[in-house]
């Protein structure tokens, strides 16, 4: 079988997370949704670690709980907006992940929004360890690119001696392909 080197966005985000998250770490899934990334993080942190998983939709947290099965003991499911993250997370954290847009296959109209996403990223940066990362998978289709534009404008202003912000994308994809933002805290 051919070995893939240029990964799509979500597998690439997972690879970055796997590189920095160790057993026993505290981490955040800021957009739990159906729980795919929550489960992946729960596997990475092990029994001694903790995943804080946020979603504003109770149905999403129920789907995440189901996806976790016995791994739920490693996860705190939080029914609140990620912009309130510092009310819940008191430990230094190793990593956080965001998957922006709508929960697929639902018609609730609930989607992430620029203002609260930026507020959450700034808050998480305060509790992120040096060398810790935030991955943000960004889709432009859900709101005509408004959240994406506001996010790029805000993150490009972050102080470069404190945080590196990189963008990873496949440039030959059709139909509003997502891209990945990767933030690494330097000090
Ligand atoms: C694209 S989905 C996430 C997909 C998820 N990673 C999965 O595995 O299914 C985005 C999720 O963000 C949630 N969301 C929207 N605004 C939010 C907020 N302010 N705080 C936390 N979650 C939010 C939505 O309810 C939705 O479930």
Image (cartoon, grey):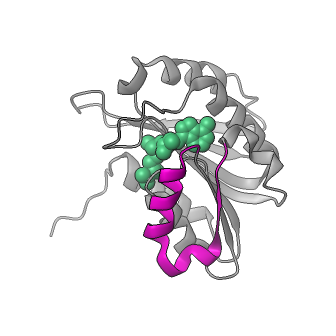
For residue 182, say whether it is visible.
no
Left or right, 78 with reference to 169: right
Q: Nearer the viewer, residue 144 or 110?
A: 110
The residue under the point 48% across, 52% down is 60
Q: Nearer the viewer, residue 96 or 167?
A: 96
Image quarter in which the N terminus is found: bottom left
177 vs 10: above or below: above
Which residue is outermost to the left?
1
**Residue 7 at what x, y percent from top left?**
33, 52
Q: Please give the range of residues in magenta.
A: 56-80
Q: In percent of the image, x 78 and y 38: which residue is there?
A: 162
In the figure, 176 relative to 103: above or below? Answer: above
Residue 32 appears left or right of 75? left
User: Residue 34 appears at what percent x and percent y?
Assistant: 43, 55
Question: Which quadrant of the view contains residue 155?
Answer: top right
Residue 187 x %, y %: 82, 47
**Does residue 24 show up?**
yes
Q: Residue at x 53, y 45 (%)?
A: 57
Please tell me whether residue 83 is drawn above or below residue 29 in the rendered image. above
- Classify residue 29 by image quadrant: bottom right
Residue 65 % position (x, y): 51, 66
């Amino acid at each position: 079988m051919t070995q893939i080197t240029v990964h799509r966005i979500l597998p690439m985000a997972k690879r970055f997370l796997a590189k920095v998250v160790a057993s026993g770490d505290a981490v955040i899934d800021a957009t739990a949704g159906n729980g795919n990334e929550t489960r992946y993080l729960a596997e990475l942190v092990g029994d001694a670690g903790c995943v804080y998983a946020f979603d504003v939709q109770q149905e999403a947290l129920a789907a995440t709980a189901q996806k976790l099965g016995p791994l739920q003991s490693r996860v705190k499911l939080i029914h609140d907006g990620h912009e309130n993250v510092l009310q819940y997370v008191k430990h230094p954290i190793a990593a956080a992940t965001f998957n922006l847009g709508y929960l697929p296959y639902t018609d609730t109209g609930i989607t992430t929004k620029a203002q609260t996403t930026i507020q959450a990223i700034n808050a998480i940066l305060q509790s992120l360890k040096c060398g810790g990362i935030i991955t943000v998978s960004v889709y432009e289709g859900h709101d005509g690119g408004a959240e994406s534009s506001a996010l790029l404008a805000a993150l490009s202003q972050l102080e470069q001696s404190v945080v590196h912000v990189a963008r990873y994308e496949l440039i030959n994809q059709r139909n509003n392909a997502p891209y990945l933002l990767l933030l690494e805290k330097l000090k």
